[in-house]
Image (cartoon, helix red, strand yellow):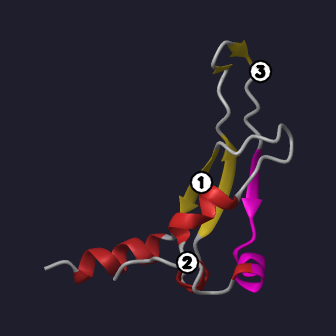
Amino acid sequence: MGIETIGDALQLGWTVIARCAAGKREAMKSHRECGKRSDLDLETLVWTRGAEFPLSRLESRLKCPRCGSRNVALIFGVPPSTIQAQLKSVP
């Protein structure tokens, strides 16, 4: 059972945190690390993107509101019950 869409993640109770991954250097310029973190509301994402929107494309659609960087990393919080269910289904 693979979780591929934001609708699947919402139904299983996942949480998603977006974190700015802008580094200290970009080419020859030095930048201050941003590190902005925000919880994403999956229900709102389903309303705006649709339940079939792929999780794999979500990262490329985000932009840091503090520094404007498109270098954003997603951190998925998977409930323990989902992990246990997947482990039981493995032969």
The N terminus lies in quadrant: bottom left
Q: Residue at x 35, y 75 (%)?
A: 84
Kindly give the residue lying farthest to the right in the view shown. 66
According to the picture, the residue beneath numbered tag 2 turns out to be: 9
Q: Amino acid at mark 3?
A: Arg
The part of the chain drawn in magenta is: 37-48
Q: Tell me if 43 is positioned left or right of 73 in this view.
A: right
- Which is more N-terminal, label 3 or label 2? 2
- Mark nearer the N terminus (1 vs 3): 3
Query: In this figure, which residue is indicated by the disc labeled 3?
Result: 32
- For the image, the number of numbered tags is 3
Q: CA distance from mark 1 to mark 2?
A: 13 Å
Q: Quick check: is 15 in the magenta stretch?
A: no
Front-most of 36 and 22? Answer: 22
Find out whether residue 41 is within the magenta segment: yes
How many angstroms separate mark 2 from mark 3 (CA)? 33 Å
Q: Is residue 18 above or below residue 79?
A: above
Find residue 34 and report its image quarter: top right
Crowdedness of circle 3 by 10 Å Cα count: few (<14), some, many (20+)?
A: few
Which of the 4 image quadrants contains residue 17? Answer: bottom right
Distance from disc 1 to disc 3, alpha carbons, whole Å, reads 20 Å
In the structure shown, which secondary structural element does the residue marked by tag 2 occupy? helix
The amino acid type, in three-letter code, at marker 1 is: Leu
Disc 2 residue crowd, few under 14, some 14–19, many 20+, Cα 10 Å: many
Front disc: 2 or 3: 3
Q: Which residue is pictured at 73% across the width and 35% down the height? A: 35
Q: Mark on residue 52? A: none
- Name the residue carrying label 1: 74
- Going 55% across and 60% down the picture, which residue do you hit? 76
